[in-house]
Image: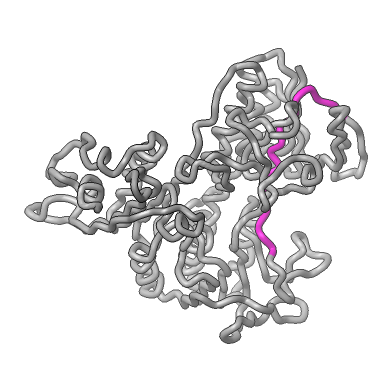
Amino acid sequence: MKVIVIGCNHAGTWAAKTLKATDPNCQVVTYDRNDNISFLACGIALWVGGVVKDPKGLFYASPEGLKSEGIEVYMGHEVTKIDWANKKMTVKELKTGKEFEDNYDKLILATGSWPVTPPIEGLKQEGTTYGLKKGIFFSKLYQQGQDIIDEIAKPEVKRVMVVGAGYIGVELIEAFKNHGKEVILMEAMPRVMANYFDKEITDEAEKRIKDAGIELHLGETVKKFEGDDRVKKVVTDKGSYDVDMVVMSVGFRPNSELYKDYLETLPNGAIVVDTTMKSSKDENVYAIGDCSSVYSCSSKSHEYIALATNAVRMGIVAANNILGKKVNYCGTQGSNAICVFGYNMASTGWSEETAKKKGLKVKSNFFRDAERPEFMPTYEDVLVKIVYEEGTGRLLGAQIASKHNHAEAIHAFSLAIANEMTVQDFALSDFFFLPHYNKPLSWMTMVAYTAK
């Protein structure tokens, strides 16, 4: 059997490795436009901020490593056209422009995603690497991380704006502050990280962002970028701001150009797949990673949740099913965590606001308590919120925030959602007690126990 994998970052890498490890006789071929694989983009802010000194640590695999496993690896190659009926494709070597054809028995699409480029006047500029006006950057690829580092090293770059207060944007403002820059965070929504956390939690994050000296603008939309040869000013619906550099961080969209006219997709271009990662239209085509939809255990429907953790699991599942080993993708809760100027936050499933936007009938409970008994010499408060289905009490989401790191506790809530536990079930779950760490009825238990 010959399997071609288009795209070789997290999902594609794990699909290719799993295919070859499971069946050494399987011919595995990968094509990717880039010159590197497995870059952990979630570490860009740590690299930019100087926490990570050597970016080589942000890679866990290499093209040479895949080749040593018997995988045929073609970096710097773009698949430009697919003949779905005859299972053929046209491939272009980007360095030379040379084109050739290849064929497959099974195809895995792992084309990934690309930063959203909103229709803002002055954002685009012809002739630049990524089509953006000079001085404006994306933050996804290794090369883009290096570009940002090179730019902030210039002494004339003093004032930096980050557009978008999701996870990436919030992490980057701290990185820029570490370099002594004046930093502006611009967000069109009324709160930071509003897709993941509710107001009880984001209020605390916003306080710490302001206390760190960040100029925070919420509910404000960018309308125009001004500057002749490079960006000099950002104009919004509420004012204008002189800047030396801008990073766009307003989300990602699937790279759907190859398949958009053939496969069934969600409105944003993510491929609809079943639990084996097989596409709904073509039994010979599988889709994984950021170009694919995933099954949400919270909403019980296909959603777009672009995370490296999902991508890796999807690659493993697709490979096994292609080789005849029935493995079902168990779904996702979209668990995430972030450290905001020393304040630790984690979420899983849906926030109350997001759940209601999706038309779910939900209730919630917010609880604040000391992380361990007050008779201990030191302790900090923990904020925790759960979201659950009205009527059944089925858990749909949870959020945690504290000065001390309790982020890994989100895994317990994630497993509860995956196993369709109710608030009542969780309230009576068995959690250990020791004064060093928690209370007899800890904040994890009490947020469920006090839910109405």
Residue drawn at x 51%, y 65% is 165
- 223 horizontally vs 219: left or right: right
- 154 horizontally vs 282: left or right: left
Is residue 266 inside the magenta stretch? no
- 253 horizontally vs 88: left or right: left
Residue drawn at x 82%, y 67% is 126
Up/down of 130 relative to 84, above or below: below
Residue 207: x and y in percent read 35, 71
Residue 325: x and y in percent read 59, 17
**331 or 211: nearer the viewer:** 331
Up/down of 223 relative to 52, above or below: below
Residue 125: x and y in percent read 79, 70
**281 or 9: nearer the viewer:** 281
**Residue found farthest to the front:** 391
Which quadrant of the structure image shows residue 58? top right
Up/down of 51 relative to 39, above or below: below
Q: Which residues are magenta?
A: 102-117
